[in-house]
């Protein structure tokens, strides 16, 4: 059936799983890890991960979405909108702090090249993806 959200305890549990997994995977090279190995590393049964995120890929997508939201917020606060390359450079600096998440993102991006892969829609809809491409295209003189 899967998690629908709403109850405070469930929201907190989902957030704690997301946070623990992000900390676990962000600082080390990303590998195609199983739900079992992730669960063991963060002290959670794999079934709980599936309940709250639907799948391992769902967990990874939630991690990337959270990181994207956080970096968009930080960059929007610190970067001058009239200088999109500054925004990009700030993103690169923030991403350098979490090499495992960058590798995870690149893995999802690679998987998303297949139309029917679960990551395809996620990456296509990812907040800011088209906007960043368009802004960078404008700076270098090509259509984004």
Image (cartoon, rainbow, N blue to C red):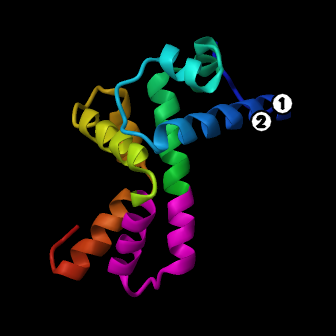
Name the side, left or right, on which 99 lies relative to 64.
left
The crowding category of the residue bearing disc 1, from other C-alpha atoms within 10 Å (few below 14, some 14 to 19, many at least 20), is few
Q: Residue furthest right?
A: 8
Picture layout, residue 131 above or below residue 30: below
The numbered dot on residue 12 is: 2
Q: Could you tell me which residue is drawn at 18 percent across and 71 percent down?
A: 143
Name the side, left or right, on which 117 lies relative to 140.
right
Which of the pair 44/131 is nearer the observer?
A: 44
Which of the pair 85/34 is nearer the observer?
A: 34
Q: Could you tell me which residue is drawn at 42 percent across and 45 percent down?
A: 101
Name the side, left or right, on which 134 lies relative to 128.
left
Name the side, left or right, on which 10 lies relative to 44.
right
- Residue 77, magenta (yes or no): yes
Q: Position of residue 92 (x, y in %)?
A: 36, 65
SS category of the residue bearing label 2 = helix
Q: Are marks 1 and 2 in contact (CB under 8 Å)?
A: yes
Q: Identify the residue position indicated by label 1 in the image.
A: 9
Magenta stretch secondary structure, dominant: helix
């Amino acid at each position: 059936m899967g998690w629908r959200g709403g109850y405070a305890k469930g929201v907190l549990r989902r957030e704690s799983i997301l946070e623990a997994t992000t900390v676990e995977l962000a600082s080390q090279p990303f590998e195609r890890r199983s739900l079992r190995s992730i669960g063991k590393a963060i002290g959670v049964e794999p079934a709980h991960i599936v309940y709250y995120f639907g799948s391992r890929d769902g967990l990874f997508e939630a991690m990337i979405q959270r990181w994207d939201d956080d970096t968009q917020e930080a960059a929007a606060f610190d970067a001058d909108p009239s200088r999109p390359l500054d925004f990009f450079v700030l993103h690169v600096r923030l991403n350098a702090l979490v090499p495992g998440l960058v590798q995870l993102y690149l893995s999802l991006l690679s998987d998303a090249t297949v139309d029917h892969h679960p990551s395809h829609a996620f990456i296509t809809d990812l907040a800011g993806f088209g906007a960043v491409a368009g802004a960078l295209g404008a700076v270098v003189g090509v259509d984004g």
